Amino acid sequence: MKQIDMNSPEFHEELEKTKKFTDKVCKQFGWVYNPNEEVNEGVTMGLARHKLLYGKRFCPCFMVVEDPETGKHKSADDRICPCKPAIEHEIPEKGVCHCGIFCAPEYAEKAQAEAKA
């Protein structure tokens, strides 16, 4: 497997592209970021890493496997960000996606209020 140097200019460039990508996703779906910055940073770094390793922003919370028939990589639960389960079920029903980076505005407000309490 290809190794990724997370201090390399290549990684930092992809990380910036990934941040722009997640900004665009929030705007497109009316979502907001998790008020916990550590969650957002970890997920963003994972998305950037997967983009460099596999050419797609696979959800970093799920395994990426090689399809034995095609030799191409895919996430074990077919999760490419923003994933279908997050769009159709997780955020509408729970207020947050599995990875935690994307939230419904109401969920984020409640989480932020609870963190202050």
Image (cartoon, helix red, strand yellow):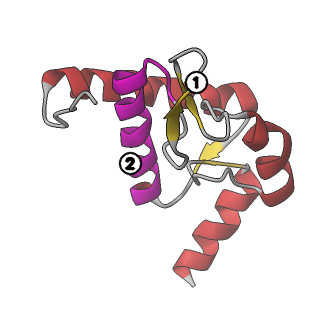
For the magenta stretch, what is the residue range? 38-57
Q: Which residue in the protein does label 1 denote?
A: 24
Residue under the point 61% across and 18% down: 69
Relative height, residue 105 to residue 117 (above, below): above
Q: How far across and how far down the image is residue 16, in percent? A: 33, 26
Residue under the point 39% across and 21% down: 17
Queried whether the magenta region covers residue 15, the answer comes back as: no
Looking at the picture, tell me which residue is in the foreground, 22 or 51: 51
Residue 81 in view of the camera: yes
Q: How far across and how far down the image is residue 98, in percent? A: 65, 53
> Which amino acid type is shown beneath numbered disc 1?
Lys
> Along the horizontal axis of the image, is 82 left or right of 3?
right
Main SS of the magenta part reads: helix
Relative height, residue 50 to residue 38 (above, below): above
Queried whether the magenta region covers residue 44, the answer comes back as: yes
Q: How far across and how far down the image is residue 11, in percent? A: 24, 27
Q: Which residue in the protein does label 2 denote?
A: 41
Q: How far across and how far down the image is residue 114, in percent? A: 62, 78
> Along the horizontal axis of the image, is 103 left or right of 59?
right
* Number of marks present in the image shown: 2
- Mark carried by residue 74: none
Indicate the secondary structure of the residue bearing disc 1: helix
